[in-house]
Image (cartoon, rainbow, N blue to C red):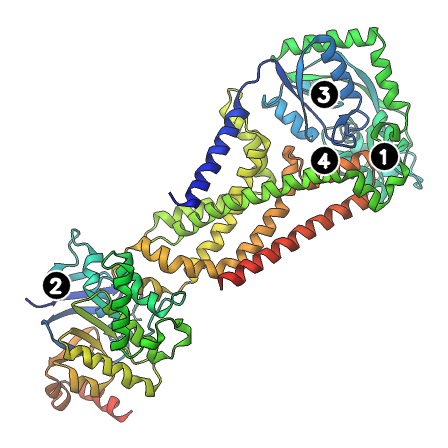
Amino acid sequence: MAKVIVKDLHKSYGDNEVLKGLNLEVQENEVVCMIGPSGSGKSTFLRCLNDLEVPTQGQVIVNGHDLSDKATNINLVRENIGMVFQHFNLFPHLSVLQNVTLAPVELKKETQAQAEKTALELLETVGLSDKANAMPKSLSGGQKQRVAIARALAMHPQIMLFDEPTSALDPEMVGDVLDVMKKLAAQGMTMIVVTHEMGFAKEVADRVVFMADGLIQENGKPEDVFEHPKSPRLQDFLQKVINV
Amino acid sequence: MKKWQVAVVMLLAALGSWFAVGTQAQAKTYTIATDTTFAPFEFQAKGGKYKGIDIDILKAISKKENFNYKLKAISFGAAVQQLSANQVDGVIAGMNVTDERKKTFDFSNAYYTSGVVMAVAKDSNVKKFSQLRGKTVALKTGTAGSAYAKSIQNKYGFKIKYFNDSNNMYNDVKVGNSVACFEDYPVMSYGIKNGIALKIVSKQYDAGDYGFAVKKGKNAELLKKFNAGLKAIKADGTYDKIINKYLKSDQASLTGETAKSRTFVGLFTQNIGTIGTGLWMTLELTVISIILATILGLALGVLGVMPGKVGPAISSTIIYIFRGMPLMVLAFFIYIGFPDLIGHGFKIPAFIAGMITLMLNEGAYTGAFVKGGFAAVDEGQMEAARSLGLPYWTAMRKVIMPQGIRIMIPSFINQFIITLKDTSILSVIGIVELTQTGTLIIARNFEGFKIWLMIAIIYLIIITLLTWLSNWVQRRIN
Ligand SMILES: Nc1ncnc2c1ncn2[C@@H]1O[C@H](COP(=O)(O)OP(=O)(O)O)[C@@H](O)[C@H]1O
Ligand SMILES: [Mg+2]
């Protein structure tokens, strides 16, 4: 069964319909990259997948749990679906290590000692074992984002959502973060990544989804989407991105 | 239970037992209210004991008639209100027997007869009522002097300014803000004899009787005893002795003040005991109120940022009500209005009423900035916490509150200082805190400037210490 199933997803803010009926399935171990112009609803879509936004209509099924079902415990669903934000959202009052151990310890997934051990391993994976006791404000953007990834991984999620994880970074920091994400993909993590990094999408994605005007316009293998765009909308978008 | 939980439970238990004691009916001991500053009828002598014609007469009568009483010195207005609200059994406070008052109270036979005089500053040339036109006259609320002045106001066309105690009224005339005041003859002449720089320029008008009052239809027995006792002390000469003692002697022999003690340092050392008691009351009220207001404020703040509409609506309403109500109105409402509503002789001790007042008022202000502080934490923080699977309250406790509270620290410090200052307003319900202590001391020695300076300095010292402490805590937290 697919890890994520989205059926006829609609979302409106007042009169403004942002998502106008999306359908998407993401299989286990699949990496899906979402591209599209700003304001097209990519973030809104991702946030509907872990219930940070409640859809106005349609169905979202994550790991077999229907999010619109009242009986679904959303906290349990969220434990299995990690999220990484554009602006990191690290907890500024906690050290790097505490950021990573907070959820597993509070949710009694692991003891403090176990959680710290896991956290140190994760920090090692993202290349920040020496920053365990640093405070977030002393880190660079790239380092913060890697801590945020480690924090999400600490709950051992089966799915990871990334919302433009490198957009707020200085160019020289982008590579480190993308490397971590590539490593994750290679380990078989199911990932949905909203990104403007076309190189990353070409190299890592199993599928690329192009969103515009609240709808999925194209959905296919990277080479098809990038080399043979069908819609003028996508051709236009790629033109602009490549020219930048 | 954690340590702080134990502390809260103990605090609540202590308050509860206090309440219980306060509400118990005490057999055979009457509570009799008097004014705080109405020399020579009542005033606080050095060491905090009350003296005066009323006090001595009451004492002599109680001895003759064998009853126990507890004296409660509060402002005249509060005494009258409490008597009508059945919170005290009787009032003896140089109170004129009037037809108006007879509707609410039963009075004893007159124990003194006195008329109203007009007094002006020593160097004033005002002699006649006709010279008052267009000027301001100082009056003390609820007195015979005030009633008389009101009755001639239209005829002579003067403006009126009301005061809650005699001393402030005298001072207003002395410094020239008002041109005259109207006061009972014995009160005025006693004050002038003791150094008030005013002079009496009229004869006595509207001579009226002073009576001891009980609530209409209540405490008939007490009234009977008072009348019998009064007759007895008049017969055996005790009454005359008391009157002469106060109207024919100078203040020094009554209050123990001497000329030497009139320097700043002298006044301070003479009154250090009284001031210390007031200061202690102020600190006690401040600390307890700060703790309670902080708990209430945090609760209101958390409620105010809860998802959904109900929590925020409740929070806003409570904040709206208690922030909008003047502290003094709230204090009167809780101390006098609320027991009146409940009836059955229900009483709230002044200290508890004061504490609840401060808790609600300061708690509402605290709630408003706590809400603001939580709202100021970046939305992404809550989202990140929730996306990890943390439930709302855990996210609140572990992520939002620690950050929000850091933002609020300066507001908390500010609120602590305001709370300290606001305790002074509670003197209106008879709590003898630092400010009221000042009023009481000045009522007997008339050293307004030096005593207020002393009180002001003490407030500044505590506020400075409080600020230092807060800054230290702030540094520790950051
Ligand atoms: N909380 C919100 N309230 C109202 N409008 C919103 C909200 N969040 C997003 N939108 C609107 O939805 C549209 C899509 O936003 P978003 O999903 O952030 O687009 P993208 O991530 O593709 O740039 C935008 O027009 C944005 O203004
Ligand atoms: Mg976006």
Residue shown at the point (11%, 88%) measured from the top left: A223
Q: CA distance from mark 4 to mark 1?
A: 25 Å
Residue shown at the point (46%, 33%) measured from the top left: B13
Q: Is the residue under label 2 in contact with that under label 3 (CB below 8 Å)?
A: no
Chain letter of disc 3?
Answer: B
Residue type (three-letter) at the residue carrying disc 1: Glu
Residue that numbered label 1 is attached to: B257
Q: Return the mark for residue A63.
A: 2
Residue B443 pos. (x, y %):
79, 35
**For the N terminus of chain B, which image quadrant?**
top left
Residue B391 pos. (x, y %):
28, 55
Q: Nearer the viewer, mark 3 or mark 2?
A: 2
Residue shown at the point (66%, 11%) measured from the top left: B222
Residue type (three-letter) at the residue carrying disc 2: Asn
Q: Nearer the viewer, mark 2 or mark 4?
A: 2
Q: Is residue A7 above or below residue B119?
A: below
> Is B222 positioned to the left or the right of B334 in the image?
right
> Is A144 positioned to the left or the right of B329 in the image?
left
Residue B286: image quadrant is top right
Residue that numbered label 4 is attached to: B164
Badge 2 marks a residue whose secondary structure is loop
Graded by Cα atoms within 10 Å as few (under 14), some (14 to 19) or many (20 or more), the crowding at tag 2 reads some
Quick one: label 4 or label 1, which is nearer the N terminus?
A: 4
Q: CA distance from mark 1 to mark 2?
A: 87 Å
User: CB of residue at label 4: within 8 Å of ligand 1?
Assistant: no
Q: Is residue A8 above or below residue B96?
A: below
Q: Is the residue under label 3 in contact with that under label 4 (CB below 8 Å)?
A: no
Residue that numbered label 3 is attached to: B92
Residue A127: image quadrant is bottom left
Asked if both marks, 2 and 4, belong to the same chain, the answer given is no
Residue type (three-letter) at the residue carrying disc 3: Ile
Badge 1 marks a residue whose secondary structure is loop
